[in-house]
Image (cartoon, rainbow, N blue to C red):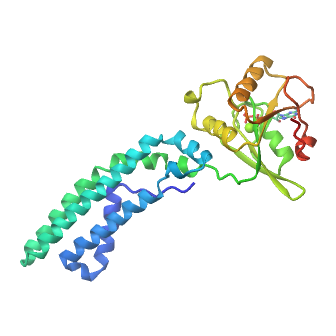
Amino acid sequence: MQFPKIHLSKEILDIILNQLKKDKQNKNVFRYIDQFQKKITDYYLSILNKLPDYTKMEPFYKLMSQNIVPYTTMEKYKNHYLATIKIINKISENYKNKCKNERDFSKRDKLKKEFLGRITSVIKKLDSTNKKLIECSQEFKRIPNPKKLFTIVIVGLPNTGKTTLLTKITDANPEINSYAFTTKALNFGYFKKREEIIQVIDTPGLIHKEFKEMNTIEKQAIVAIKTIANIIIFVYDEYQDIQTQKEMLEKIKEENQNKQILVYSKTGKQILDEPHITIEQILNKQFKC
Ligand SMILES: Nc1nc2c(ncn2[C@@H]2O[C@H](COP(=O)(O)OP(=O)(O)OP(=O)(O)O)[C@@H](O)[C@H]2O)c(=O)[nH]1
Ligand SMILES: [Mg+2]
């Protein structure tokens, strides 16, 4: 997902001061302040425009984003930039006026230094917000970009064979291991049924936890199930505890009552009460109701 590149105050100040130095016309202090004001407010406006707007997002992206930064916190960050832009504009207009009325060259130079000092202390106050957004920017960039296709989401306990199933039905090539928690992000794969392309999402192993106690990746799995799954395939492993798997299946059913859940059992044995499905049936899109 797109996320703005955010600089700390010192970095953005260096960038803008260097740009201003290159233009000789900026020897004129009025013009210097005017250009500085334009560049710095443009920069903060571009951050505001690129920060995610949760109100305009599709449910998948909205829930994914809220797992990283809650809505009210994101609004607080945006207001911080907005308030800073207003202060910068006020200070800049004030100093441009002072400059207009000042004919003495050395006094104008003093005004320029004073102006830069004030602006520096104003933008420094943004650094706590800047740091928090820089810290979570990678998580936003890692939000996958699912296609709007018929989508199967594969779920189950850790180490049950979810990723192996993905590799059997699509051309995806993710990591598979004999230990639990191998999958640490959503894996995507695609297969074709006649002219239709079907999207398959493999999720990290789920264990019984409340949503608020889950880590970001576990929450991503729940969000994918809730928002983009047309079909949920629960991978059952007969070598793992049956009761735990039954409880997990019940929980998924309860939370996704409008979705069809099918069980895939590696041995093909009909163990749980839900309808079972084979690889052949998945590839033929034969989803029994
Ligand atoms: N014999 C056999 N082994 C399988 C099958 N499916 C998976 N396995 C083995 O089970 C282990 C776990 O497989 P994965 O596909 O990584 O399981 P997972 O559910 O994706 O695991 P996590 O991502 O850690 O939750 C690996 O050693 C696989 O080789 C199967 O159909 N038959
Ligand atoms: Mg896996």
- Which residue sits at x=9%, y=75%? 101
Q: Is residue 109 visible?
A: no
Q: Is residue 231 visible?
A: yes
Viewer-closest of 179 and 83: 83
For residue 93, above or below residue 154: below
Percent across and percent down for residue 19 are: 33, 73
Viewer-closest of 228 and 95: 228
Q: Which image quadrant: the N terminus?
A: bottom right
Residue 34 is left or right of residue 46, and the answer is left
- Which residue sits at x=23%, y=59%? 119
For residue 96, above or below residue 153: below
Percent across and percent down for residue 21 are: 28, 75
Ligand 1 is found in which quarter of the picture? top right
For residue 127, above or below residue 17: above
Residue 71 is left or right of residue 193, and the answer is left
Identity of the residue furthest to the bottom in this view: 25
Q: Quadrant of residue 112?
A: bottom left
Percent across and percent down for residue 133 are: 43, 48
Residue 118 is left or right of residue 55, and the answer is left
Q: Which image quadrant: the C terminus?
A: top right
Q: Quadrant of residue 154?
A: top right
- Which residue sits at x=74%, y=19%? 244
Q: How many marks?
A: 0
